[in-house]
Image (cartoon, grey):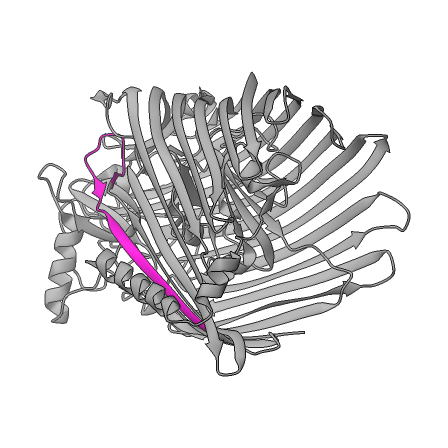
Amino acid sequence: MKLHRTTSVIALLAGMTIAMPAMAAAAAEGTQLEELIVTAQKREENVQTTPLSITAVTGASLAKDRVLTLEDLSHNMTGISFTANSPQSNEINIRGVVNTRLSSPTADQSVSTFVDDVYVGRSGNMNSAFYDIARVEVVRGPQGVLLGKNVAGGAVNIISNAPSFERSGKFTLSLGNYDLRQTNGYVTGALTDEIAARLSFQTINHSGYARDILHNVDVENLDSTQARLQFAYQPKESDLRANLNMDYSKDSNDGVNRVGIKSPTLPASFTPWSGTRLLIASILGHPLDVRESLPVWPLFKGDTSPTPQGARHETFNAILHVEKDVADGIRLSSVTGYRHNHSFTLYDQTGLGPTNGFGVAAPLLFAEPVNFIEQVNQFSQELRLASTGESRFDWIVGAYYQRSGVHQFNRFWGESTVLPTLSGESHWDDRGHNQDMAAFAQVGWKFTDALKLEVGARYTHDKKWGYQAGQIIATGDKLNPLDTAPLTPLTTNFGTPYGKSWSKLTPQATLRWTPDDLNMAYATVSVGFKGGGFQNDASNATAAALAYNPETVTNYEVGYKTELFDRTLRWNTAVFYMKYKQLQVQQTLASCLCNVISNAPGATIKGLETDLQWAPTKWFRGWASGSYVDPKYDTFIFAGVNNSGHWMQRTPKYQGAIGAEVTTDAGLWEDALSARVSYRWQGKMPWAPENTTWEKAYGTTDARITLQSEDKRWSISAYGKNLGDTLYRTNIIAFFQEEMSSFGAPRTYGVELSAAF
């Protein structure tokens, strides 16, 4: 029904363009889609001639759709999805390859994120919102040679707007429901004849999308501040180019909303959380909304008052890009990155416990707040030598080094009506180190002007080591003070070193056929690699020192990209077949209610992605995209459960998106009024390899209307996100016959005022 309504709106907008008097002339002249330049191959290339399944979205388009985070991005395009296990674990899924609940200090991301070509090693570092960016590139499939760090499943590369020697600036104020107050802007210009600078900033404040009714506070609120300062150095009469990027971000909120929902698919069992919510609702005299929860605030041993739920992140980054021609036809590029992050997260995994303020306690009801305190220091250095100029032969060689130190201090606190292993307090102190060294090379040869072969390989040596200690702080709770069993998953005090290294050669070969400047076809075979690691919050020393294995993905892909009708229509399609080996999967064992990381021997993933853009006149632009993914475990038996042949977790088989934008005159102001609407749909998906818990299919609709002054100096916009107020989940954890659920953002709307010079 929602899709029908949305497409009707799009049809209406299209009909508006037919009535516009300038349409016939514009159609006769032809209007070309903008050319997008990407750097995923470490060279500037038109996205239409890049032999990858890649989607590039400009910063202007992202701003129109209010795409501020990776979660927003996943709700704006197909072939990518997002789940949020916790404020410390944001998970991106591309083609079924997903980093599922891996938050240990030695865990890598299956789908990697890069900011200005620097790898973001921790999923907890991905909370910062987008602002003043040039584009976002989403690369699908393994990239084992050039992308930076070896990539198993795909990557998201966020590119900031660079300093300009021409003076300009912009300021935007947004006001909306949930008390939204957002500001962002930039100013740029020349400091000297050879140095330009750019200062960018953003602040976001809004009240909570949900409510903690036990403590009478908002949750899922946000208070965020970000700033970026860049300097570009371009000396006269020299080919030296240097860019220094320094940014800082800080955000906080008052916690997450977790609600236990009776599962419609799990076998019949106890439903203590949903049952207790019904009893509390009867006491209150009205039903509890899914955006109302009663999270427990833990009283850690030695504290005089409980610690509230919440999350705080503080990040500083510095990135230095340098390019210089060192010989005729040879360019040296250097990318140096440093990242520092400190984060604190505390959330109640169940959102309701025996101490709920209403005296209601059901059998097996428990609360288990978890507290992650993490500090990260990461350094990376990449050096590349590449050929320049036009010739039949081109090449690139390079080396990469990355090292990070992650100190993670975790506190688990539990309170239970029955089970002794679910009450008490346990601590883990984990100091992990990650070192990645790699050398890579790629050569390209044009057999003809139209046919080119590119062959490359990367050798990666990945080393992980550290020390983990687990300590039983307290047993029992006020309900059962005589319990002696430690809080799960810890079984005994321990302290142990751990360490292991892995090496892998990942080749890639791509055949590219470009018969003319409107068409390109490619066929590629590529291998991606992600290193192994070690379990955090281990039950004992043996579990802490036992490594899980690396995972690899081999991708066979063909694609075709074309532009038609005087470049008013762009159509890109890719078909792929992937073999995924030793994929790292973390699951919750019902026997101990603890998380365990294991390797599934293999999976087969096949599918298709297609993207269409149409701009027949300067008044109208439409787009549509879709993806089909068939992901199946080949063989996977875990804890006595045979998941072989099951649908891979957190992977929707179908996704689709459609949208349109219309621009017209407003009185005497030419091209001053625009309206934009988009709809994205996601098919059902299983939450776990057992395929016993599912997320239903759902869709969301966004819209925007903008009036811009004739001189383009100011604009006013009204926008709406998730206009149908669709209720969907971003994560679940199954306990008994219940699904502890987290929900996506509700309907949001507001106005934006922008001024530029």
613 sits to left or right of 481: right
Residue sitting at 62 percent across and 77 percent down? 711
**Vertical position of residue 378 compared to residue 360: above or below:** above
Classify residue 548 by image quadrant. Answer: top left
> Residue 489, can we see it?
yes
> Residue 360, can we see it?
no
> In this orientation, which residue lies closer to the viewer: 371 or 541?
371
- Tell me which segment is drawn in magenta: 685-706
675 sits to left or right of 477: right
* Position of residue 426 measured from the top left corner of the image (x, y, whole percent): 39, 40
- Residue 72 forms part of the magenta stretch: no
> In this orientation, which residue lies closer to the viewer: 159 or 371?
159
Classify residue 103 by image quadrant. Answer: top left
319 sits to left or right of 330: left
Residue sitting at 79 percent across and 33 percent down? 331
* Position of residue 399 measured from the top left corner of the image (x, y, whole percent): 70, 26
- Residue 687 forms part of the magenta stretch: yes
198 sits to left or right of 427: right
**On-image quarter of the N terminus:** bottom left
**On-image quarter of the C terminus:** bottom right
**Vertical position of residue 476 compared to residue 163: above or below:** above
